[in-house]
Image (cartoon, coloured by chain):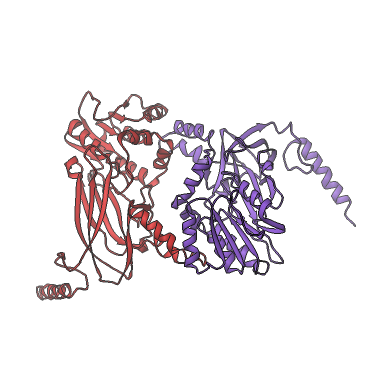
Chain colours: A red, B purple
Amino acid sequence: MEGMDTTDYFESYEDLEIHQLMLSDVARNKAYKKAIEDNAKEIKGKTVLDVGAGTGILSVFFAKAGAKKVYAVEASNVYKIAEDVVKENQLSSVIEVIHGKVEEIDLPEKVDIIVSEWMGFYLLHEAMLDSVIFARDKFLKEGGLMFPESATLYSAACSVPSMFEYWNNVDGVSMRCFGEKLRQKASQKPITEQIDPENILTDPENVLWLDLREVTAEDLNNIKIQQLAVANKEGTYQGICLWFTCNFPSYGTEPVTLSTDPEEEETHWKQTTIVLPTQINVEKGTPLAYELGLQRCNENNRRYKIEVTMLDPDEIEHPEFCNCYLTKCILVRAMLEKYEKDSLPN
Amino acid sequence: MEGMDTTDYFESYEDLEIHQLMLSDVARNKAYKKAIEDNAKEIKGKTVLDVGAGTGILSVFFAKAGAKKVYAVEASNVYKIAEDVVKENQLSSVIEVIHGKVEEIDLPEKVDIIVSEWMGFYLLHEAMLDSVIFARDKFLKEGGLMFPESATLYSAACSVPSMFEYWNNVDGVSMRCFGEKLRQKASQKPITEQIDPENILTDPENVLWLDLREVTAEDLNNIKIQQLAVANKEGTYQGICLWFTCNFPSYGTEPVTLSTDPEEEETHWKQTTIVLPTQINVEKGTPLAYELGLQRCNENNRRYKIEVTMLDPDEIEHPEFCNCYLTKCILVRAMLEKYEKDSLPN
């Protein structure tokens, strides 16, 4: 995955077009807005820190929901737009825009709530979460709220026809060699593409669950997990699709989830897919095993290296109740089902 | 509009992703394919030159349609993929891939047909047409065919809500200042965006019609035209939308048109829109006058400068039969209608 150093990072975020893209992401805006409005009772009279406030939209949501004070911290020159947005919404008495890195600024008080839209592609790309964690440890009151409060990264095996079948027949022309070149390139850099839910071949597996009230930057350095997924339909296994969800605090109301699941409304994050060098035909029940690694290139760097290693599904442990077609799992399943039946009250 | 020098041009075209985008453009592929298949009788046994062959797909279409020989000339390293595509389709005996600029290569013969997909954004961006003209003058037999044979550039007044209204209320937040920044940026660089046909406010006017059998590179240096358009509905005039169509030769069959009209299937060219600094409310019949200039920065350059100047509709000549609401035109229209009625046979 292409990374950028800290300087580039801020230059890139100054780009209006990126903010245009984010502000035009309806699912993103709506999730934050609803989570904030639903928690208006908890927010009323409270202090809020918006980490990486950008154009200030989340700060305005909080001010409108009744926050007493919002500190909108933005390191890039976009802070100037945030200032204009605050004025335009006549919220200068509530929102204070602070130009600086959250690691280098000071606040006159600790805050009740931290909000941030820190999520990158496959959740961790650009690693803005580090800044949110720093801000939490320095500025959040004991027991304060985090918006979002938790995040989950998922993986699932999938088909990627745009990288495989499409090139077998492009309006009657065989262009397999072009597909090969695309896949060679994709082997160095995962693709960002909206995946048709029809092309997801397994139930999603958790890669990572983050409690944002407790996670540390170190927890994000080296994520490595072995996945065993079972194909829930016939298909062609061509890639590993990654997506994430975020949950917001909730008191009595249905918790709001921002989801980048292929089944949900498209967001600007789409999904991130690691394309396999060759495809594998699977049938319903085929066990698929792989190791997924997300490793930060070094601690001062916002770049991650994503690696997928295929594993032999015979050689890794299957869950107790596994739907795969290996004899061992079929036997265990039959036994467990019998046990369950026998233990039912007559 | 961002331009690039010749070196960048080829480096950019080596980018697989651009070719992926073009090869995934269904409307583009289908139009060339149909035009070529419909003309199979004219193509059988003929020689073809493909200028800027890229991955070679158009050359394969011609070979499959019965061409005797196709010279596929490609200056960038993509020629290697074209070679693989030719082999993969077992057409090595018909298609000869030549690595080089068409201005610097030699062919053993003149050809019957020249094909090229030279069109850039707003038709002229990147000015690859210069190379096609050069190739035509040097390599095309007298009376040979050009695919495409003609091209038309259109302009129409339009609304661009993504640059105006959207920012009045982004999920309850007023972000007009952000919209202003976007428009400032757009004033230096037209936007490439698919325009909803609902947002086109006038009938399209021709900016340029090119007969590709005759056009010269000089014809493309400085295009300047005064347009008088009449709003055919109520709306907000916020930009000038540009798009193009290309026509292919036809003998007896319905001619094939490749269109990037907002009304038609989306293509990778979308439309190019010059965003106005401020918006103007119009009603049905409002005359809108502007001068549109497309000027090549200098003759060795593939860059164009696009300029729009608003004109006073009272001060430029209206067509004889004008639908606008100015008294002069209403009177002329009434007179002409009366004349027409009077001259009808009883």
Would residue A218 be found to the left or right of residue B154 on screen?
left
* Residue B290 higher or lower than B195, as above or below: above
Name the spot of residue A17 as percent of width and height, x first: 43, 39
Determine the image quadrant of residue B207: top right
* Residue B281 higher or lower than B119, as above or below: above
Q: How many marks?
A: 0
Name the spot of residue B164 as percent of width and height, x first: 51, 37
Name the spot of residue B291 as percent of width and height, x first: 67, 35
Would residue B278 be found to the left or right of residue A326 on screen?
right
Determine the image quadrant of residue B293: top right
* Residue B261 higher or lower than A36, as above or below: below
The one nearer the camera, B59 or B165, is B59
* Residue B121 higher or lower than A111, as above or below: below
- Tell me if I can see residue B61 in this picture: yes
- Tell me if I can see residue B233 in this picture: no
At 62% from the left and 64% from the top, the residue drawn is: B36
